[in-house]
Image (spheres, coloured by chain):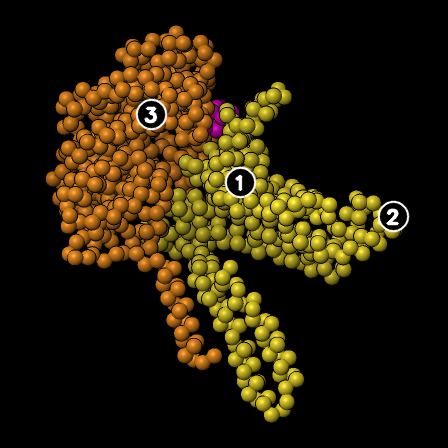
Chain colours: A orange, B yellow
Amino acid sequence: MSAKKIARTVIAGGAALALLAGCSGGGDTDGKITLDVWTFGGMGLDEAFATYQEENPDIILKVTNAGGSDEQAQALTTALAGGKGPDVAAIEVGYMSQFKAQPQNFVDLRTLGADDIEGTYLDWRWSQGVAADGSVVGIPTDVGGLAMAYRTDLFEAAGLPTDRDAVSALWPTWDDFIDVGAQYREATGKGMIDNVNSAIFNPAVRQGDEMYYGSSENDLVYDSNPDVKEAFGYALDAIDADITSRTPSWSEAWNAGMNNGDFAVLAAPSWMMTYISQQAPDTAGKWDIAAVPENAGNWGGSQLTIPAKSDHPEEAFAFIEWLMSPERQLEIFQAHGNFPSTPELYETPDIQNFTSEFFSDAPVGPIYANSVESIQPIFEGPQQRIIDTAILNSLSQVENGEEPATDAWTNAMKNVTTALGG
Amino acid sequence: MVLSAPPRSTPPRSASARRLTKSAAPKPRRRIRSASRMDAFAPYMYIAPFFALFAVFGLFPTVFTFYVALFDWNPIGGQTFIGFENFVTLYGDERFWNAMRNTFSIWILSTVPQLLLALFLAQLLNNVRLKFANLFRMTMLVPYITSVVATTIVFASLFGRDYGLINSFLNLFGIESIDFAANTFASHVMVSTMVLWRWFGYNTLIYLAALQAIPKDVYEAAAIDGAGGFKQFIFVTIPSLRPVIIFTVIVSTIGGLQIFTEPLLLSSPGLTGGAGRQFQTLSLFMYEQGFGDFKFGYGSAIGVTLFALIVVFSLINYLLSRRITSDE
């Protein structure tokens, strides 16, 4: 074997490695600009992307759908850790606090004119994209809003009212909600709600003006904030009153349960309408929508960010501005049920008169609009999701009968401390 | 597979070259010796691609993990050197010991029945009177080549609390439904079943190969001495299989300590392996800390500990196997 041969082998090996490393980053051809856009499932943006592509022939949209919001967050983490990133990245609000704690990874959108469009969006929704240092990391996409989707046929069988206004009137407070659940259990022997985390704790804990953090990253109040303990208490009361069917959200049993009537009530943000109609198509017309207790709530939504490594931040921002404009958000809502985060639309006939056939022609537009307008901006620190997970897990343990309710709060607080210390 | 082909073809070639050198006449010896020197070098070039890839994707990450474990390391933020603090915190962390218990419990619950079942099936498949033996042997590998994701989805549905087939079956006998995902022990049984399902065929085939290598006359001698089928199995088959059994135990141990995919998929959404972390294994805990909670340093400390654990177990296995083989 000659030196030449060895050299050739080494070069071939090197080439193979370079191939394996999968160098991405396509060059811009013919003066066209390529925008790398990372989204995940359920955002309902596909038609909007197509429209944009049609109207802007000089820009090539390269859209990558990571699957779920968890996968997207992990893909983005990996990219940012490796000093890379797309031009536009969607981040689900649950992960937003973790990413915006490191704002240096993103373009401060104030430098691109974010201040000018701030007033278009719900203030609390806007604040979810603002980092502790005041830099604007992300522009809001849709807002979840919150309502209680309920099965009219099951309510009728349980001797409860079926009219949406009458149902809303049944539960102005969480205590009332739990009482209704107890009646339902007595009449049918079944749990009324899917699980306490989704139907009670999540909405209830977000109805105050503070959650786990006070006003800054170092101001942890999860153990002292009475709102948290109160929401936790409602969940425990609900377990005690046996109003839950103990069906975890997103599980297979949950999907089946929507069809089979294992539970009659489920916390439904606007985008959930599409999900229910897909999972339980046979129940069309048997669902209706009522207000959540205390009449305020949100579940979900995302921010669109521009990672600092983007080569085309101006174009990316112009794209985001266009994509999340009120007109576009209205189209997305009409096609997919993702509720707009721009309040100027709420009083328009498009929203006010919007009804859902699947949900017995319920006027879902005004119901969701009401649920998001009274929400207060909440400061979410970097450990938000870790604290949330620990508390929700403790509640699930009680719900599943694995841990006694009496120690639940102590255990939850201990679990949070462990999770924060690790 | 393609990579491993060239090195396999090299030994016979260099062996034949060596034979050539021995028998060659004195005169051309020098030239042949230099040829053999080239031949001696060639195998290294053939295996170089593997080691180059291993250095990049195996060795470097391993060494780098040790380095990262000494830092408070946010993957998208800053890094602060904190020495061994991660390890100190880790060994006082309840979640770590919980993950350790789960890992060992799932490992034992999956490995022991798996190897026994594999041994039993291998014995059945080795029967000379078995028709279509090759068909059955190939079938053993189907679970192994099926996607883990598909397997997990099917098993999760079988083990479902409300609509699971297993619970419907138990209900027939008046046994109340078990919440497999929520209960600690039941969830271990569920995960172990999936692991067992995936690997038993692989071990069966290994045992089968070893069984076929046992000379027939040993059995004939045992039969003449009056040993029945069961006695033959205990006193002839098992001792002959000892090295292979050791091998499968080592491989299952290394695999068992790294169980990840099944608990991850069952855990979704979330990475905690159930609300009470009841089936969170060490690998899943590592992933949760590193990629879920953005604590790369802490996650690396878990990785290093897991690495050390596997080294210790492999060493114990190695020593045991050496003693057993030298017994023979």
**Closer to us: A4 or B182:** A4
**Closer to us: A242 or B82:** A242
Q: Which three-letter amino acid code belongs to the residue tagged 3? A: Ser
> In the rendered image, which quarter is residue A51 located in?
top left
Q: Which three-letter amino acid code belongs to the residue tagged 2? A: Gly
Label 3 sits on residue:
A277
Q: Is residue B90 magenta?
A: no
> In the rendered image, which quarter is residue A133 located in?
top left
Label 2 sits on residue:
B226
Asked if residue A372 lies left or right of residue B308, the reply is left
Residue most extreme to the bottom: B27
Q: Position of residue B125 (x, y in %)?
A: 68, 46
Q: From which residue to which does the magenta span run?
A: A396-406
Q: Secondary structure at mark 3?
A: helix
Q: Residue at x 32, y 38 (%)?
A: A41
What label does residue B154 carry, if any? none
The quadrant the C terminus of chain B occupies is bottom right
